[in-house]
Image (cartoon, grey):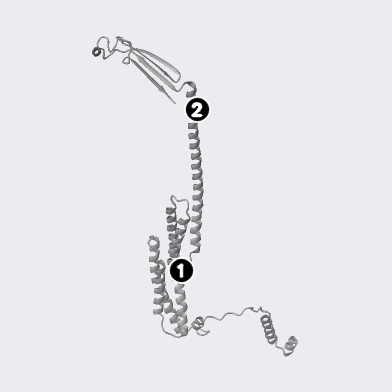
Amino acid sequence: RLAARAGATGGPSISMKLLAVFIAAAAAFSAPRSQTRSSPAPRSVLALRGGGGEPSEAMLQATFACNRLYASCLAEANAEVAMLRKTVAAGEDLSGFGAKADAVLADAEDKFSAGTPAGDADVAQLYADKKEELSEAVLTSIEPAFVKALAALKETALESFKAQAVGQDDLANAASAAEAAFVKGAKVCVPAKAGWGYKAERASLVAVIDAIKSQSKKASAVKQQAQQQMSTAMNYLQLQSQQMQQIQAQYAGGQGGKWSLGAAYRPPDTNINLSGSYQQGRANLQLSMVPDEGAALLGPNGFTNGVGPANLGLSMNVHL
C-alpha cells in the first residue's frame, strides 16, 4: 500500500524515507536489551564532567592541585620507606619496624590533610578518595620491606634454635623458644593500619624446625645404636679375656703343682757353686764357678769345715 501510495503521488523520495524509518524502528526493536542496570557514575566523576556535560573549570583546577599534593606526599613517604629498607638490609634491630611504618603512613596522611583545601562537597570527596589512594600506595611501598623483615626474623629464630639444639636430645624446648621469639618479633613489625599477617612465615619456620628435629632424632637413634653395639663388643672382648685367663690358669695348674723349691750349696774352700730349683713341675740344676770374695776375711777354713747354715741355703714357696 505504501509503495502504491507513493507511486500515486509520484514521489519516489517519500517512499524511500518511509522505508528507512521502518528499517530503523525494526533494528531498534530487535536489539538485545541489557539484563543489568548500569551503576551510576561516582559523584566526583559527575562533578568533574560538569554534571553530565563538560568538566567545570573549578573541578579541573581542584583535580590538578589534588594530584600534585598526592605526588608530593608520596615522594616524601617513599624517601622514608627507603630508609626502612636500608635498616632491614643492614640487619639492624627490627623491634621498631612496625612503629616506624605507622609513623611514615601517618605523616603522609597528615601532610595530605594539611594540604586539602576547604571547598564544596565534590572537592572534599575528591580529596578523600585521593587520600585513601595515598595510604594504599604507601603501604604497597612498605610491604617489600616488611616481607624482608619477616625473613630476617625467621633466619634469626632458626639460628637460635640450632644453637640451643647442640648437644641436646630433646629439642622441644628449643623449638618452642625459637617459635615464640619469631612471633614476638613479627607482631611488632606489623603496621597497625596494614592488616598484614605472618601465618605463612610462621608455618614455614615450624616446618623447617620439624625437619631438623626429625633428622636429629634419626642421628640420635643411629648414635645410640652404635654405642650399644660398641658396648656389646667390649663386653664380649672382656668375657673372652676372662675365659682365656681361666683357660691359662687351668692349663698351668694341670701341668704341675702349685709349689716350688730352690737350694744352693758351696763346698768349703772351693769356687764351686751348686744351685737347683723345682717350679711348675720342672727341675733346674745349675753348677757354676764363682770365687768366694770373702775368703780372705774368713780365714783358710771359712766359718766351718763342714756343711752348716752359712754355706747351705734353702728356699721353698708354696702356692695355695
Question: Considering the numbered disc 1 on the image, is that residue within a helix, a strand or a loop?
Answer: helix
Residue 27 sits above or below residue 234 on the image: below
Q: In which quadrant of the rendered view does residue 134 lie?
A: bottom left
> 163 and 259: which one is in front?
259
Name the residue at 67% across, 83% down. 25
Q: Amino acid at mark 2?
A: Ile
> 231 and 97: which one is in front?
231
Quadrant position of the C terminus in the picture: top left
Q: Which residue is mark 2?
A: 247
> 236 and 14: which one is in front?
236
- How far from the left and from the top, in percent, is residue 182? 45, 61
Q: Which residue is mark 1?
A: 140
Name the residue at 46% across, 75% down. 132
- How far from the left and from the top, in percent, is residue 203? 51, 60
Q: In which quadrant of the rendered view does residue 261 lie?
A: top left
Mark 2 nearby-residue class (10 Å; few <14, some 14–19, many ≥20): few
Quadrant position of the N terminus in the picture: bottom right
- In space, the residues marked 2 and 1 are separated at their CA atoms by 87 Å
- How far from the left and from the top, in percent, is residue 273? 34, 13
Q: Nearer the viewer, mark 2 or mark 1?
A: 2
- How far from the left and from the top, in percent, is residue 247? 50, 27
